Image: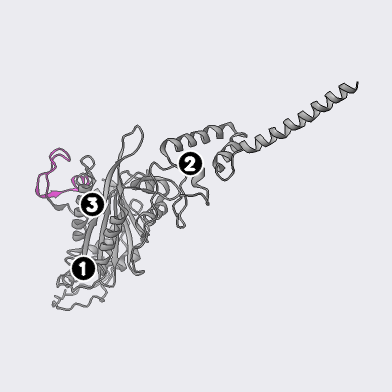
C-alpha cells in the first residue's frame, strides 16, 4: 500500500511537469499578432463563415503569387508600405499593378476654369466608355485656353475601386467618380463637364451643314476610304473619322479629335452662328449630358468670340513621350498605357503656364462681334421682337475693348427635339 502511494504521487508529479511543458510549447508556437495580423484575422472570420474562408484564401494565394497586398491589408490604416491616399478612398479590389501616389505640385491659380469634354461610345440611355477625354483650362482674364487630350486606355487609379482604364471611370460611378479620378491622377478637378454621344456629334456636324477637314494621312481601309486633302464631311463621315483607331495608335485618334474640335469651334463662332445657341441648346437638351444651363452658356459668348482669335487656344496631348505600353497580367493579353507621372505633370504645367501671359488681339475679334450682332438683330426682327433697323458697319480698331458685352437674344425658341437622325 505504501509503495502504491509512492507510485501514484510520482505519476501525478510527472503529469504536472508534462502539462507545464506542453503549455509552454503552445505559447512558443502561437503566431505573433504583429507579424501575422492579416492571417489571424482571416482565420477568425472564415471559422464562422465557410464562404469567407474560400474568398480570403484566394486573396492570400493571389497576394503570394503577384506579390500584391490583399484587400484586407490595403484597408488597414496602419499597414506598412501603403501609399498616402491624401483623402481619397482606398481600393476595394486588388490592383493588377501598384497604385501610384496622387499627382501633386501643379501651380494652378484659383481663377483658372477647368472643364472636361467627353465623348461616349454608346447611345443613351446606356452608359458606355468615354473614348474622348479632353481637359480644358481657361484663363478668362487673358482670354486664353489650353486643351489637353488624354488617352482613354490610360491605366490609372479610380478612387474607391482599383487600377483600371480611365475611360471606364464615368461608367463606374458617373461624373463624380470621373472628377475624383482626374483629381487623383492629374491634380485637377473639373468644375463643368459636357458628355456627347455618337449621335450628338453626328447631329451637330449635320446642323452645321457639314464641315471641311484637311486630312493629312489617308485612311483607305476604314470609313469608306478617306483620301488625303480637303474633305467635305457630313455627320456620319466625321463621326467615323474621330472614332477610328488603328490598333494601339490612340494618339493619332486624339489628334483627329482635336482637329474636329477646332473646326467645329470655328464654325460656331464665325458668321454669327452663336445666335443659334438657344435653339441648339433646346435641341440637344436631354441628349447631351452637362451641368451647364442656358443662361450660363450665354454669358460665355463674348469669351468664346475672343478665344476664336488666332492662337488663343493651345492644343496638347498625353502622348508617346508620357506613356508606355503595358500588358495586363492574365489570359486576356489586354494592353494599356501606363503614365509616367513626372512627364504628365510637366505637360500639364506647360499647358497651364501658356495661358498665364497676356497677348494682343487682332481685328478679327471685332469682326466676329459684328457678325454676331447682325445675326442677333436679324433673328430678333424675324421673330417680331425688334423693328427693322439699318445694320451699322463697325470701324476696326487696333485696341478693341474686350470687356464689351454683346446683346443676347431674348426670344424663346419653339421647336421640338426631333431626336437622332
Q: Position of residue 418 (x, y in %)?
A: 30, 49
Gap in angstroms between the C-alphas marked 3 and 2: 33 Å
Q: Which residue is the site of mark 2?
A: 70
The magenta segment is 216-239
Q: What mark, if any, has residue 372 been given in the picture? A: 1
Residue 171, visible in the rendered structure: yes
Q: Assign the C terminus to one quadrant of the image.
A: top left
Residue lying farthest to the left in this orientation: 229
Which dot, 2 or 1, sits closer to the camera?
2
Q: What mark, if any, has residue 321 been given in the picture? A: 3
Gap in angstroms between the C-alphas marked 2 and 1: 60 Å
Residue 355 within the magenta-colored segment of the rendering: no
Q: Position of residue 326 (x, y in %)?
A: 30, 42
Q: Residue at x 52, y 36 (%)?
A: 56
What secondary structure is found at the residue carrying circle 3?
loop
Q: Quadrant of residue 389?
A: bottom left
Amino acid at each position: 500500500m505504501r509503495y502504491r502511494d509512492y507510485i501514484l504521487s510520482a505519476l501525478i508529479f510527472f503529469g504536472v511537469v508534462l502539462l507545464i511543458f506542453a503549455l509552454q510549447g503552445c505559447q512558443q508556437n502561437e503566431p505573433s499578432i504583429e507579424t501575422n495580423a492579416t492571417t489571424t484575422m482571416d482565420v477568425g472570420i472564415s471559422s464562422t463563415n465557410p464562404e469567407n474562408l474560400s474568398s480570403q484564401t484566394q486573396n492570400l494565394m493571389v497576394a503570394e503569387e503577384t506579390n500584391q497586398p490583399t484587400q484586407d491589408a490595403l484597408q488597414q490604416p496602419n499597414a506598412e508600405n501603403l501609399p498616402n491616399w491624401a483623402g481619397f478612398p482606398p481600393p476595394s479590389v486588388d490592383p493588377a499593378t501598384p497604385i501610384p501616389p496622387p499627382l501633386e505640385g501643379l501651380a494652378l491659380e484659383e481663377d483658372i476654369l477647368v472643364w472636361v469634354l467627353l465623348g461616349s461610345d454608346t447611345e443613351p440611355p446606356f452608359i458606355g466608355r468615354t473614348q474622348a477625354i479632353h481637359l480644358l483650362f481657361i484663363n478668362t482674364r487673358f482670354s486664353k485656353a489650353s486643351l489637353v487630350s488624354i488617352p482613354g486606355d490610360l491605366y490609372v487609379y479610380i478612387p474607391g475601386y482599383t487600377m483600371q482604364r480611365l475611360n471606364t471611370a464615368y461608367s463606374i460611378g458617373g461624373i463624380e467618380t470621373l472628377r475624383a479620378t482626374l483629381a487623383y491622377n492629374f491634380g485637377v478637378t473639373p468644375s463643368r463637364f459636357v458628355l456627347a454621344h455618337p449621335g450628338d456629334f453626328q447631329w451637330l456636324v449635320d446642323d452645321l451643314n457639314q464641315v471641311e477637314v484637311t486630312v493629312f494621312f489617308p485612311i483607305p481601309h476604314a470609313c469608306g476610304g478617306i483620301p488625303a486633302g480637303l474633305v467635305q464631311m457630313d455627320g456620319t463621315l466625321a463621326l467615323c473619322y474621330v472614332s477610328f483607331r488603328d490598333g494601339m495608335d490612340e494618339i493619332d485618334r486624339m489628334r483627329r479629335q482635336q482637329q474636329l474640335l477646332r473646326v467645329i469651334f470655328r464654325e460656331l463662332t464665325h458668321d454669327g452662328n452663336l445666335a443659334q445657341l438657344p435653339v441648339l441648346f433646346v435641341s440637344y437638351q436631354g441628349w447631351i449630358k452637362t451641368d451647364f444651363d442656358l443662361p450660363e452658356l450665354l454669358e460665355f459668348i463674348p469669351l468664346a468670340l475672343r478665344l476664336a482669335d488666332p492662337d488663343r487656344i493651345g492644343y496638347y496631348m498625353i502622348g508617346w513621350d508620357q506613356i508606355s505600353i503595358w500588358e495586363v497580367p492574365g489570359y486576356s493579353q489586354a494592353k494599356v498605357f501606363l503614365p509616367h507621372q513626372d512627364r504628365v505633370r510637366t505637360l500639364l504645367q506647360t499647358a497651364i503656364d501658356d495661358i498665364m501671359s497676356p497677348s494682343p488681339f487682332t481685328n478679327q475679334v471685332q469682326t466676329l462681334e459684328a457678325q454676331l450682332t447682325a445675326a442677333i438683330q436679324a433673328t430678333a426682327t424675324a421673330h417680331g421682337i425688334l423693328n427693322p433697323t439699318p445694320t451699322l458697319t463697325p470701324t476696326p480698331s487696333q485696341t478693341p475693348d474686350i470687356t464689351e458685352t454683346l446683346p443676347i437674344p431674348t426670344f424663346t425658341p419653339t421647336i421640338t427635339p426631333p431626336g437622332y437622325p
